[in-house]
Image (spheres, helix red, strand yellow):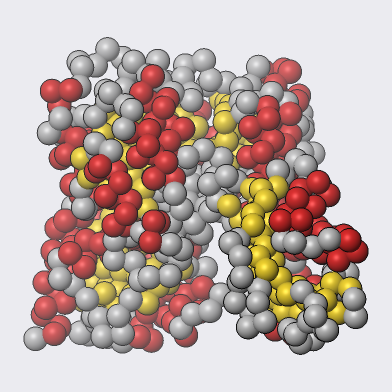
Amino acid sequence: MSILIDRTSRVIVQGVTGAIGRSIASRMMEAGTAIVSGVTPGKGGETMGPLPIFDCCHDAVERTGANASFMAVPPGAVLDACFEAIDAGIRTIVIYCEGVPVVDAVRITRFARDRGATVIGPNAAGCISPGQANLSDLADANIDHGRVGIVSKSGTLTYEVADGLRRHGLGVSTLVCLGGDPVIGTGHADILRLFEADPDTDIVVLLGEIGGRSELAAADVLRTMTKPSVAFIAGRYAPPGRRMGHAGAIATSPAEDWSNKTRSLAAAGAVVVEQLTEVAAAVASMQSRIQPNHA
Amino acid sequence: MLTGSQALGVLAAAGIPVRDGRTPDGAGQRLQIGVALDREQRCFRLLGTRCGDDGVPADDLCAVTIDPALGPRSFLTGRMIRRLGLRGAAAAQAGEILRRLYEFAQASDACGIEAVLVTDGGAMAVAGASLELDPSGAFRQHELAAAGAFDVPGTATERALARAGAVGIEIDPAGRVAGVISGAGLMMATLDLLVATGVHARLVVDLGGTVLRGTSGLAPVFAAIAETGCPVILVNAFLQTARCDALAASIVEVTRGAPAGMRLIVRLRGREAERAQEILAEAGIPLIPDLDAAIAATAEAACAVAA
């Protein structure tokens, strides 16, 4: 078992004929993810290697049973592509691209909620359950299967932590990168609830950053969780009022800054580390809480 | 951000009644109203409060959450207007202005609007406004973009880096280290590590998409950094989609004519990192795979140039 995606996931790549879509689809095929088709309007009937391409998601779902989508379309096309995927019945969607207008993100998340779909992103690296399915830009070869769940806004921070866990002989059950935009479809708290219910996850790593209140909502969930957690918040020394790369990484009130977030997470029972490079060691120190792998 | 007459002009062009001057006529009303993004609820809210003659809010803020599927229906705006104490024709006009401001925000990629609403000849009109526009919407807001409405303020270096497709944050003009990093999260975490080690960072840069564009993407980034005269550069990337070998080749290329005293520390991990190490070694640039070790080397270099 894992969260969001597993061996039953049947993945499509929307925008598969673009540079990013092609690269991600090729990697998924090489790694053995069950990628069943690509979708690019106007390219229906073509193929990319063994992969059929459809004009629209409805065709892809009807012909291949697709239920998850990695969206690699440009920002201006994301709104329609997302509506289409959700309307076609796809239930897990990763919006990869950066620069999706906030008003579009608001409409997407509302429609997804109505239809019971999970949207990760925009501006998200995606999610991967190593050995089962990969709906992300992360390379399967760089992440070991294990029993640590990771949830993060940032993709690059998860690369570091997964790599650090590997050096400690630890692996990942599912890794979820939520995205760094101001409005994202899924927050830390949503993923923590899933990890708590996942029998294959023993410890949770929460990676956050300044700006927004996703980590504060996560602290409320952590208080109720039975599984131990390690947390790191990036941006301690960010200049006040500056947007730190991610569109959502700006503290607009004291509640959204590093101090309050770390204090809230620690009060909720998380082991909070001050530096990124301390995360893996903190998890390793809890190894007694990790069951032997039964992948 | 658009303010003053520029903001009023944009609103007038969108069919919203405006007037110059913030003083209501006669014994008229003055309200502060707005449209604001609620990140956590993933929706917009309408805000309003009554103001005294001095323009200071006289009441607590009224807020109404707008369901994106419903939009600002009259029962929603009407509830807020009644709470603001308006009745009759003024209430209807104020409600209509609120509705139009919300529609304007949706159509123009505005994620925040603040407006002063006053009576004007017996009718309500916007007498002052500021519009916060979402830079992600600039690609489809051609007129507003041409007017500079999406321009992000910043230093000359930050603007040069933005033109190059990267995000630069100036930290300390007296700092001696520039961090060139792939990814916003890692950029923040790297700054945290540098500062905790006692390093005064001059600026940090998130390469963003430039990391995929080879030498042509990296060259303007390094040119902008060179303009600052910063003597130590730390490159830090953990690449999954882009390739370390391609980035290493670009680093070698763009630093070929660098000043003799410049110290370059390169930490790369991820895709094709071993090949990257070979490329850098051929150019006499050591690659430090471990992040803590790279930070320590950067701190040492910063001390050396300061000595």
Q: How many numbered marks have been drawn onto this rendered protein structure? A: 0
Report x, y in % for residue B287. Answer: 21, 59
Residue occupying image coordinates x 16% and y 77%: B302
**Res B145 seen here:** no
Residue B27 shown left or right of residue B258 in the figure? right
Residue occupying image coordinates x 67% and y 68%: B50
Report x, y in % for residue B38. Answer: 58, 52
Residue occupying image coordinates x 67% and y 51%: B64
Position of the N terminus of chain B by quadrant: bottom right
Q: Residue furthest front?
A: B27
Report x, y in % for residue B167. Answer: 46, 68
Residue occupying image coordinates x 71% and y 56%: B83
Report x, y in % for residue A86. Answer: 69, 30
Q: Quadrant of residue B113 in the image? A: bottom right
Closer to the camera, A1 or A9? A1
Closer to the camera, A138 or B130? B130
> Eyeballing the image, is B15 above or below A95?
below
Q: Residue furthest top?
A: A294
Position of the C terminus of chain B by quadrant: bottom left
Q: Quadrant of residue B192 in the image? A: bottom left
Residue B256 shown left or right of residue A64 in the figure? left
Closer to the camera, B134 or B156? B134
**Res A91 seen here:** yes
Closer to the camera, A213 or B137? A213
